[in-house]
């Protein structure tokens, strides 16, 4: 009942099947791409956000970099300590950063909507970069926050909210990836490494103008009087180029900032919430 | 107009209402009074260094800022008085720059100017006198004139173009100057034609100013060819002007001297003659005060006169809100935050606009109609540049030749979605520059 047609077609199909199976088998063994199993394992540990904060295009590339020893195990910014430790365990490495410290984006301007002294009226594109690069910004102070929120739009983790014309950083959400630092046309945001047990203090000013000029342009700007150097914790504050800056590596949990905050004549040394305090207020 | 008699022009451009309200108003003097604020950087290049101190008494024409290097220009006091402050002042361009404040004594004493016969001067001496007089391009760019007149040896310059187009709406200062002082303009032109050793001199002017064209044509010997160009904005941009007059195209990111041309504005040419022949430094210029300012007209104003001083002398601003005060014309001028900024060497007008003339509208999304592409005199793609700058793709913006934009504003003028295209492009230019640093 089976004619020769059936036999011919069946054997042709079987022959083709065997041929392709053979080709696939050949390709599987001879053309195989060796993937380091470590890379896959590291990639499994990474959060898979592909945010690019580490400097690599995505998590896969970072995993490769770590496996090849190009990148340190704590490269993943949003992953934080936990991911760093897991990767270090896997590779038998030590995590270099000190425990008990965290990196955080710190905003060095304290002029809210009421304090910002505007000149003229800006009617252009609502963007700090556009305003700064096309008109020089419409504020008396050429160093202060323009308040159009480019940083908040740039943040991949929704850690920045514009409150009263200033960026407010959520320390729990901030991963110190640096996108806001890149975006800010006036370099107001800086990534600092803070001690989790110590006070979260900053100089909320970025003005390099002389004291008299600052007084004219802003009520809450640093006038570089140098009081903080004298009354603050030792070696923490230093006034350089008409601006007081803090050295965050020079103090721990015992440092007392009350005097500095109290004595600053323009009130530009301020406390800001640590992750613990931030979650308490929520 | 038939094809045969068509006047030379360029591709693109727009026809905004020209609003030349002050066309028939003769140039009048504004007496210097009160205080002057003279920026030490009124030119492209290194800012001048102050050579006076607070408390010094200065006279008109006295040098108060020394040029720093070749691409720089000195600055002179525009009237007599006491220097009361050397510090930062807001420049009409928006930035704070170092400047000299002079409280005037009202006597307007002047230093003695050294006259010279240009026929007896060597080229070097002429260029020295031009730099010494602090002359810079008065059409807007403020490039030091002596630099423009010293082309590198390998460039073969054969054409000089005098720019009398004045295509900006409202402005009439160049037109009135051409009408009232044609002799000085012609003599200045002949002088720099000799310096550059060119064989061809064009005087380009728009055809809405026939009487000024006639004034030059009838007085100049055959050496200057006066060409009336169609009234179209931006006919006065040097690249479109050169294209219309010579048919040559300035390369992207190139200069006119790459194709053998030098362009000078009429006011600059007049200042050159004053500087070389009479030794008078650039301390005053013609400014069109117009718009809603009372008594609009063309005025000879001392450099450093603040907007408020000038406006007050003319009778002030009208009641009601003045929405905008612009240094220059409505298309390319800089909006001023207040009346404190001074008239500088490149200030061709001071324009006040009321509420109804300066409406800020919200922009809506681009509908890709391509109108901006049609009108762009630089043949760019404003909509694509805007998209790339908005998304932060600066590399793409660079590929699109963003830096070739002259910021004429034609694209923004025609955009039906009211997108501030020029602002995005200006941002793109700054971002490209920043990346190179």
Image: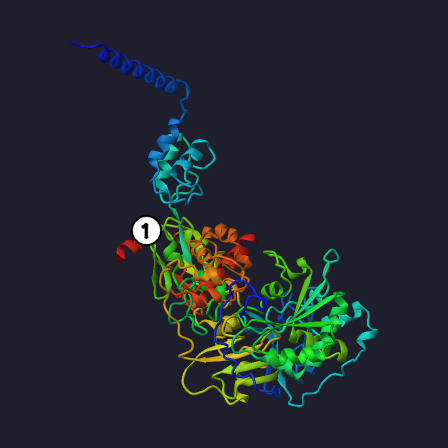
Whole-percent x, y for residue B158 in the image? 72, 62
| Image point (63%, 86%), residue name | B104
Q: Can residue B381 be seen from the camera position used here?
A: yes
Mark 1 falls within which chain?
Answer: A
Disc 1: which residue: A172
Whole-percent x, y for residue A77 in the image? 39, 44
Quadrant where the image shows the C terminus of chain B: bottom right
- Rendering colour mode: rainbow
Left or right, B270 with respect to A186, comes to: right
| Image point (75%, 57%), residue name | B153
Residue A20, compared with residue A282, is above or below; it is: above
Whole-percent x, y for residue B116 in the image? 80, 78
Spot the residue most to the right: B120
Left or right, B312 with respect to B177, comes to: left
Whole-percent x, y for residue B61 in the image? 70, 80
Spot the residue most to the left: A1
Which one is nearer the viewer's eye here, B13 or B388?
B13
Q: Can residue B302 be seen from the camera position used here?
A: no
| Image point (77%, 71%), residue name | B126
The quarter of the picture where residue B345 lies is: bottom right
SS for callout 1: loop
Which one is nearer the viewer's eye here, B369 or A111?
B369
The quarter of the picture where residue A92 lies is: top left
Which one is nearer the viewer's eye here, A58 or B177?
B177
Left or right, A1 with respect to B232, comes to: left
């Amino acid at each position: 009942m089976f004619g020769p047609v059936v036999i011919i077609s069946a054997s042709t199909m079987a022959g083709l099947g065997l041929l392709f199976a053979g080709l696939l088998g050949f390709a599987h063994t001879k053309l195989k791409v060796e993937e380091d199993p470590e890379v896959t394992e590291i990639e499994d540990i990474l959060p898979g956000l592909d945010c690019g904060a580490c400097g690599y295009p995505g998590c896969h590339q970072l995993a490769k970099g770590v496996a090849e020893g190009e990148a340190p195990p704590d490269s993943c910014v949003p992953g934080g300590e936990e991911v760093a430790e897991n990767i270090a365990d896997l590779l038998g490495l030590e995590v270099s950063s000190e425990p008990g410290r965290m990196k955080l984006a710190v905003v060095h301007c304290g002029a809210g909507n009421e304090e910002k002294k505007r000149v003229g009226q800006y009617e252009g594109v609502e963007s700090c970069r556009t305003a700064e690069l096309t008109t020089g910004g419409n504020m008396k102070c050429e160093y202060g926050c323009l308040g159009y929120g480019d940083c908040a739009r740039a943040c991949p983790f929704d850690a920045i909210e514009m409150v009263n014309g200033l960026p407010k950083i959520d320390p729990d959400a901030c991963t110190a990836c640096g996108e806001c630092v890149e975006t800010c046309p006036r370099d107001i945001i800086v990534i600092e490494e803070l001690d989790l047990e110590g006070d979260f203090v900053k100089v909320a000013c970025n003005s390099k103008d002389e004291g008299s000029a600052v007084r004219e342009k802003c009520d809450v700007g640093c006038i570089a009087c140098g009081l903080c150097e004298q009354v603050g914790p030792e070696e923490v504050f230093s006034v350089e180029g008409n601006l007081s800056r803090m050295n965050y590596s020079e103090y721990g949990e015992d440092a007392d900032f009350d005097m500095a905050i109290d004595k600053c004549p323009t009130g530009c040394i301020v406390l800001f919430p640590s992750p613990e305090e931030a979650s308490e207020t929520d | 107009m038939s094809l045969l008699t068509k006047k030379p022009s360029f591709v693109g451009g727009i026809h905004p209402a020209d609003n030349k309200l002050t066309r028939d108003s003769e140039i009048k003097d504004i007496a210097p009074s009160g205080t002057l604020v003279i920026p030490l950087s009124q030119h492209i290049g290194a800012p001048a260094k102050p050579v006076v101190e607070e408390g010094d008494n200065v006279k008109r024409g006295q040098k108060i800022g020394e040029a720093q290097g070749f691409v720089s220009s000195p600055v002179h006091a525009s009237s007599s008085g006491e220097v009361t402050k050397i510090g930062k002042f807001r420049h009409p361009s928006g930035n704070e720059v170092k400047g000299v404040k002079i409280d005037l004594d009202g006597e307007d004493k002047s230093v003695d100017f050294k006259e010279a016969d240009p026929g007896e001067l060597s080229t070097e001496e002429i260029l020295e006198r031009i730099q010494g007089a602090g002359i810079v391009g008065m059409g807007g760019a403020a490039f030091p004139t002596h630099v423009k007149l010293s082309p590198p040896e390998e460039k073969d310059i054969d054409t000089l173009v005098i720019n009398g187009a004045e295509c900006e709406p409202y402005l009439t200062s160049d037109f009135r100057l051409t009408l009232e002082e044609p002799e000085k303009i012609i003599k200045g032109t002949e002088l720099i034609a000799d310096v550059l050793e060119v064989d061809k001199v064009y005087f380009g002017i728009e055809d809405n100013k026939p009487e000024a064209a006639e004034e030059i044509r009838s007085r100049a010997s055959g050496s200057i060819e006066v060409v009336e160009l169609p009234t179209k904005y931006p006919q006065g941009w040097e690249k479109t002007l050169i294209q219309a007059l010579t048919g040559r195209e300035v390369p992207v990111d190139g200069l006119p001297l790459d194709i053998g041309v030098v362009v000078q504005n009429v006011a600059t040419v007049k200042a050159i003659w004053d500087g070389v022949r009479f030794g008078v430094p650039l301390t005053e210029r013609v400014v069109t005060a117009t718009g809603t300012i009372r008594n609009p007209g063309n005025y000879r104003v001392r450099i450093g006169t603040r907007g408020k001083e000038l406006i007050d002398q003319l009778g002030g601003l009208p009641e009601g809100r003045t929405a905008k005060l612009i240094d220059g014309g409505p298309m390319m001028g800089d909006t001023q935050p207040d009346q404190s900024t001074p008239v500088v060497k490149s200030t061709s007008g001071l324009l006040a606009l009321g509420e109804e003339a300066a409406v800020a509208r919200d922009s809506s999304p681009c509908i890709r109609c391509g109108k901006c592409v049609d009108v762009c005199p630089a043949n760019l793609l404003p909509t694509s540049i805007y998209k790339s700058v908005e998304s932060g793709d600066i590399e793409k913006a660079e590929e699109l030749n963003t830096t070739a934009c002259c910021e004429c504003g034609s694209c923004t003028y025609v955009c039906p979605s009211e997108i501030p295209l020029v602002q995005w492009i200006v941002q793109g230019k700054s971002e490209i520059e920043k990346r190179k640093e």
